[in-house]
Image (spheres, rainbow, N blue to C red):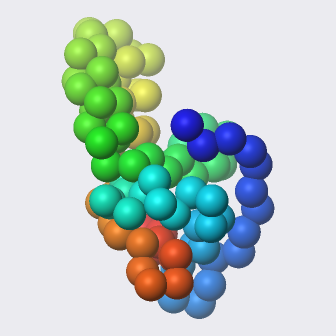
């Protein structure tokens, strides 16, 4: 679990620097997606796969479930950290 609040700038090439203390946990791949309250959500690949399974189990007959799944999945993108510890923001 990532703890804390971080405010960073996105550079001219749409990259976001990841705090050093989290880079090891993200070395095997990362998924970045739109989050709630104008935030970005960043997940290690393995954690994203668990979340995606939970999202797929939500009832499609409920409007709120569909909307939340759409928010999380539609904007999601697989990525990797570059050598400087940055991730490309879609």
* In the rendered image, the vertical position of residue 61 relative to residue 12, given as above or below: above
Give coordinates of residue 28: x percent, y percent. 31, 59
29 sits left or right of 86 in the view:
left
Give coordinates of residue 67: x percent, y percent. 40, 28
The residue located at (42%, 80%) in the rendering is: 82
The residue located at (30%, 21%) in the rendering is: 54
Quarter-of-image position of residue 21 = bottom right
59 sits left or right of 85 in the view:
left
Compare residues 37 and 63 and report the one nearer the observer: 37
* In the rendered image, the vertical position of residue 8 relative to residue 83, given as above or below: above
* In the rendered image, the vertical position of residue 42 relative to residue 7, given as above or below: above
The residue lying furthest to the bottom in this view is 12
Number of marks in picture: 0
Give coordinates of residue 63: x percent, y percent. 38, 16
Q: What quarter of the picture does the N terminus occupy?
A: top right
Give coordinates of residue 49: x percent, y percent. 26, 37
Asked whether the viewer can see residue 9, the reply is: yes
The residue located at (76%, 62%) in the rendering is: 7
16 sits left or right of 75 in the view:
right
Compare residues 27 and 18 and report the one nearer the observer: 27
Q: What quarter of the picture does the C terminus occupy?
A: bottom left
The residue located at (76%, 48%) in the rendering is: 5
């Amino acid at each position: 679990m990532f703890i804390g609040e971080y405010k960073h700038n996105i550079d001219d090439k749409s990259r976001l620097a990841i705090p050093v203390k989290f880079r090891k946990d993200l070395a095997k791949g990362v998924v970045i997606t739109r989050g709630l309250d104008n935030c970005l959500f960043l997940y290690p690949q393995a954690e994203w796969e668990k979340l995606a399974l939970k999202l797929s189990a939500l009832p499609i007959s409920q409007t709120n479930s569909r909307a939340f799944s759409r928010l999380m999945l539609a904007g999601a993108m697989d990525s990797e950290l570059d050598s400087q510890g940055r991730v490309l923001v879609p």
